[in-house]
Amino acid sequence: MSDQAVANEIQRILERGRAASAGAAADGLCHDCGERIGAERLAALPSAVRCVGCQAAWEQVQTGT
Ligand SMILES: [Zn+2]
């Protein structure tokens, strides 16, 4: 392996680790319905894994109402 190939491999592994630690929203898609989570929502709540609609429904389930 050339130095460049090693560097590329390390970069790939690092990026994979970052995506995994960022969770389901790493691709910006809702965990429940697969729709895009709005950029504004992600900016306000980077850890958001659901779109607004699915988050509201999920919270209703959690609170039992
Ligand atoms: Zn959704």
Image: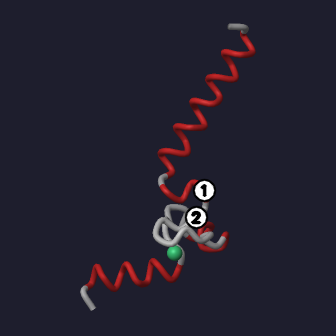
Name the residue carrying label 1: 27
In the rendering, at what x and y percent does residue 60 appear?
34, 85
Going 24% across and 86% down the picture, which residue do you hit? 64
Which residue does the image show at 57% across and 54% down from the upper left? 26
Task: Judge from the rendering whether residue 65 lies leftward or rightward of residue 38; answer left or right.
Answer: left
Query: Within 8 Å: ligand 1 and the Cβ of disc 2?
Result: no
- Image coordinates of residue 14 in percent, x first then y, are 58, 32
List x then y, in percent, for residue 62.
28, 79
Q: Classify 17 as above or below 52.
A: above
Circle number at residue 29: 2
29, above or below 19, in the image:
below
Between the residue at mark 1 and the residue at mark 2, the CA separation in whole angstroms equals 5 Å
Outermost residue toward the left? 64
Q: Amino acid at mark 2?
A: Leu
| Horizontal side, residue 32 vs residue 65: left or right | right
- Residue 43: which quarter of the image? bottom right
20 w.r.t. 46: above or below: above
Check contact, mark 1 vs mark 2: CB within 8 A: yes
In front of the other: 12 or 39: 12
